[in-house]
């Protein structure tokens, strides 16, 4: 029988052994703050109490002129970090930028003790992870860090998506992957101008009415990210690491944000990014199992007795496979309640 811990760290056959336990602590929202902005840095203690993961962003969104200020902001936050139970992550600049190397060096040597995970953007293949892995090992040895830092990659180029399995398996440091829909859209030459979410033009139309040519035909907007999220989830699960939906840029549209997060949750993601305080509660709600689903899962498990065979419950057939799904939901609920 799998324990809740196994659900959070589902090691697949052949997956690399983790260098340290993936934090079993929840990571329903990875809350971004610009480490270059002293006002936001001042709010860190308050924010840390509200989120599962707080991420000091050094990459996109921080102007070139503020990259050094962002790095110093990360150092200030890391040196003062005392938030019990909340993880501290940073997103460094990409490996082909003028800042990536200095970001990694500073992050490890100055705040490596406080940091849980380093997020690497625009990862295109396992070679990027190998490079980071070696560099981290050198820097950790230099400052005597005893716990290896974990690595999280953003999937935001077509090449990265094509190499997703190899990226997941590239190092035992791999903690998870996020979808980066904005950069991915640009790289794929999609014709959108948004940071995540859907598009009113991406839809399917109901068939024409055979009897009445002029009858209005309903349209249904489709999820632009379904394929990539599903592919990312499969690659992550097969390698025992965690999948996340990334950013949703339309801060005012809390309904669509919740829908996008819920699609990702139902497909297997464990969390999403929050870019604004309003998205923290959305992520907390969406990525925590619904109490009705938990109660139903409990009923199914009880009705199934030793877990084998099949029963009818409310007119529906339940069997071993539905019991396994119910255990996923129960394990998540237990983990979050712990
Ligand atoms: C995130 O970095 C994105 O490009 O969507
Ligand atoms: Mg990006």
Image (tube, rainbow, N blue to C red):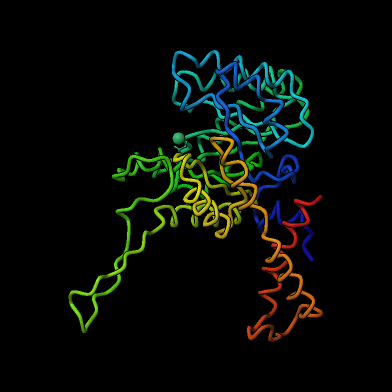
Q: Position of residue 81 (x, y in %)?
A: 74, 23
Quarter of the rendering containing residue 186? top left
Is 48 situated above or below 110?
below
Nearest to the observer: residue 236 or residue 307: 307
- For image coordinates 62% across by 51% down, the residue present is 270
- For image coordinates 39% across by 51% down, the residue present is 198
Q: Position of residue 99 (x, y in %)?
A: 49, 19
Nearest to the observer: residue 64 or residue 286: 286
Q: Which quadrant does the N terminus fall into?
A: bottom right
- For image coordinates 57% across by 32% down, the residue present is 32
Q: Position of residue 324 (x, y in %)?
A: 70, 70
Nearest to the observer: residue 336 or residue 156: 336
Q: Residue furthest left?
A: 213
Picture mark count: 0
Left or right of 180: which side holds 308? right
Left or right of 306: which side holds 29? left
Q: Position of residue 49 (x, y in %)?
A: 73, 33
Q: Quadrant of ligand 2?
A: top left
Is 144 situated above or below 274?
above
- For image coordinates 68% across by 20% down, the residue present is 77
């Amino acid at each position: 029988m799998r324990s809740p811990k196994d659900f959070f760290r589902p090691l697949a056959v052949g997956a690399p052994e983790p260098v340290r336990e993936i934090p079993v602590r929840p990571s329903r929202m990875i809350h971004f703050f610009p480490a270059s902005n002293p006002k936001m840095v001042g709010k860190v203690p308050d924010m840390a109490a509200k989120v599962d993961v707080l991420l000091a962003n050094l990459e996109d969104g921080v102007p070139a002129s503020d990259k050094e200020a962002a790095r110093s902001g990360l150092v200030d936050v890391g040196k003062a970090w005392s938030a019990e139970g909340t993880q501290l992550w940073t997103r460094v600049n990409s490996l082909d930028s003028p800042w990536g190397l200095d970001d990694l060096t500073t992050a490890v040597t100055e705040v490596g003790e406080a940091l849980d995970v380093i997020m690497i953007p625009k990862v295109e293949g396992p070679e990027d992870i190998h490079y980071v892995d070696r560099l981290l090992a050198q820097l950790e040895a230099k400052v005597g860090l005893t716990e290896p830092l974990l690595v999280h990659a953003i999937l935001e180029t077509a090449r990265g998506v094509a190499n997703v399995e190899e990226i997941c398996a590239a190092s035992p440091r791999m903690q998870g992957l996020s979808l980066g829909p904005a950069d991915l859209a640009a790289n794929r030459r999609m014709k959108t101008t948004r940071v995540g979410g859907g598009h009113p033009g991406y839809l399917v139309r109901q068939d024409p009415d055979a009897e009445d040519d002029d009858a209005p035909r309903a349209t249904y907007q489709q999820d632009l990210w379904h394929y990539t999220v599903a592919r990312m989830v499969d690659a992550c699960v097969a390698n025992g690491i965690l999948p996340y939906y990334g950013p949703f840029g339309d801060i005012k549209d809390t309904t669509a944000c919740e829908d996008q997060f819920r699609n990702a949750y139902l497909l297997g993601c464990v969390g999403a990014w929050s870019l604004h305080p309003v998205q923290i509660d959305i992520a907390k709600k969406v990525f925590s199992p619904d109490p009705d689903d938990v109660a139903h899962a409990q009923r199914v498990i009880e009705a199934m007795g030793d877990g084998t065979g099949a029963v009818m419950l409310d007119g529906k057939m339940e069997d071993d496979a539905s019991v396994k799904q119910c255990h996923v939901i129960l394990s998540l609920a237990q983990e979050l309640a712990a």
